[in-house]
Amino acid sequence: MRNLILISLILLFGCDSETSVQDTDFEIGTISVEVSYLDLSTDQLVSDNDSISLEIRSIGDNPVSIPSGVNTTSTGSSFEFGPLNFGKYKLSTEFTDDALGVTYSAVDSVEITSSTSIRNIDITMVPKNQTIILGELLNSSNMPVSEADTFLYNDSIALQQFRGLGGFIDNGSSNQLGRTVFSDHVEGEYYVLGRLIIENDTLFSKTENLTPTIVTNSDITTVTSIIEFN
């Protein structure tokens, strides 16, 4: 009788253990993520920035647990999370370009199931709820003017009076696209003044009869100014 009880216990716990292992193996998947963003200063897609942060968490009506030992946050531009239980997950990414003062972010979701246990996801981040002004300096042939001083004004009278010596609310230097990125400004009317120094000559963009560019909240708006070469 004692031997019969021992055999019954072994069979009972043995079956539970085997069933548990099979269920765990069956309900495991991985998520691989590639993250990129469009650099506003160059219009180039950046996909190799190691400062991008990503967080993953379970969502849905019945969130599943994330196995211990699996990191839910990471930095880089390529990520792999797993082993993960089958379920739906939210992916949140963010990166701040300190040079431009622009924060890029994105939120996506993905589900892993028995039929799609391995998921490869591409995420492209966009500026995060910011009002961004792209100052653009062109010549009369609509070609970009680089290495020119760029001044952002919200008052045409101040622009005409000071011409870069004061009264502006932001400034920078144009790149090879003739572009200067101005971030975190409020909704309103804006003007851009360009100043280019060539040897002993100083050229300014047009300052008379300017039409303001309307900038709205949380949008990316280009404000163009023309420098004419004599």
Image: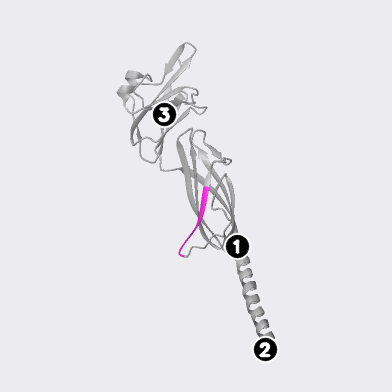
Tell me, yes or no, whether the highlighted magenta stretch contains residue 196. no
Estimate the spatial distance between the alpha carbons at disc 3 and disc 2, rounded to whole Å. Answer: 94 Å
Q: Amino acid at mark 1?
A: Ile
Q: Element at badge 2?
A: loop
What is the number of the mark on residue 1?
A: 2
Question: What's the residue at 51%, 40% (across, down)?
Answer: 38
Above or below, comparing residue 24 to residue 93 in the picture: below
Q: Element at badge 3?
A: strand
Q: Amino acid at mark 3?
A: Thr
Question: What's the residue at 44%, 14% (across, down)?
Answer: 202
Residue 26, horizontal then vertical, whole percent: 61, 67
Tell me, yes or no, whether the highlighted magenta stretch contains residue 56. yes
Residue 229, horizontal then vertical, whole percent: 46, 17
The answer to whether mark 3 and mark 1 are in CB contact below 8 A is no
Q: Which residues are magenta?
A: 54-61
What is the number of the mark on residue 224?
A: 3
| Image depth: mark 1 or mark 2 in front | 2
